[in-house]
Image: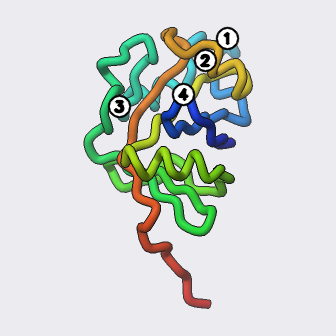
Amino acid sequence: MAAYACLLGQVASVLCVPKLDHSRSQQGGELLAEDVLLRQARRIGWVPTNDYAGWAEPARGWSATLAAGLFTVRQPDGLDWYDGTLPVTPQWSDAAKTSGKVFHLTASQGDAHRIVEQIGTDHVLAIVTSFDESAPQQTVEL
């Protein structure tokens, strides 16, 4: 998954763009319309962006940290939704620190521009995490 930082208005946001097609096929090779990534995202709390009330505030147990360019989004079960680099602007960082939250958006198809164009539809899912830029970065002893 690729992650892109952007400001939607004054809101720190991250677009999560899958690098692969996440659809699946049945035993006979028939392609299912169901998207595996979006099904899993819905199962763990993501909601369609046309349900704004469902994602207006941070979701319980979800968090995001940014330390030395490493961005980690942690699910309530302790697993990482995303763990990688995220280049951000000072404006993005200020918006995230001021509000203490980050909006995350994803869709099964398309690039970052298409995700933004489809916000407000049931094709794009969203979740809001609490944000902490000062969280300690884990180190590994070699």
Residue at mark 2: 26
Q: In this view, does 110 lie to the left or right of 39?
A: right
Nearer to us in this view, 104 or 36: 104
Q: Which of marks 4 and 2 is in front?
A: 4
Write the residue at 36% across / 34% down.
Answer: 44
SS class, disc 4:
loop
Quarter of the image holding residue 9? top right
What's the CA distance linking mark 2 and mark 1? 5 Å
- The earlier-in-sequence mark between 4 and 1 is 4
Task: Say which of marks 4 and 1 sits in front.
Answer: 4
Give the residue at the far bottom of this rendering. 142
Question: Which residue lies under the disc numbered 1?
Answer: 30
Q: Helix or strand or loop: what does disc 1 sit on? A: loop
Q: Please name the residue that numbered disc 3 is placed on.
A: 45
The Cα atoms of the two marked residues, 3 and 1, are separated by 28 Å
Q: In the figure, is residue 51 to the left or right of 49?
A: left
Nearer the camera: disc 3 or disc 4:
4
Which quadrant of the figure contains the N terminus? Answer: top right
Up-down: is 121 above or below 68?
Answer: above
Task: Count residues near mark 4 (Cα–Cα under 10 Å), then give few for <14, some for 14-19, many for 20+.
Answer: few
Q: Residue 8 location, x and y as percent?
A: 56, 29
Q: How crowded is mark 2: few (under 14 residues within 10 Å), some or many (20 or more)?
A: few
Lower position in the chain sequence, tag 3 or tag 4:
4
Whether tag 2 and tag 1 are in contact, CB under 8 A, the answer is yes
Question: At which x and y percent is residue 28?
Answer: 66, 14
Q: Report, in whole angstroms, how far the alpha carbon at label 4 lies from the one at label 2.
A: 42 Å
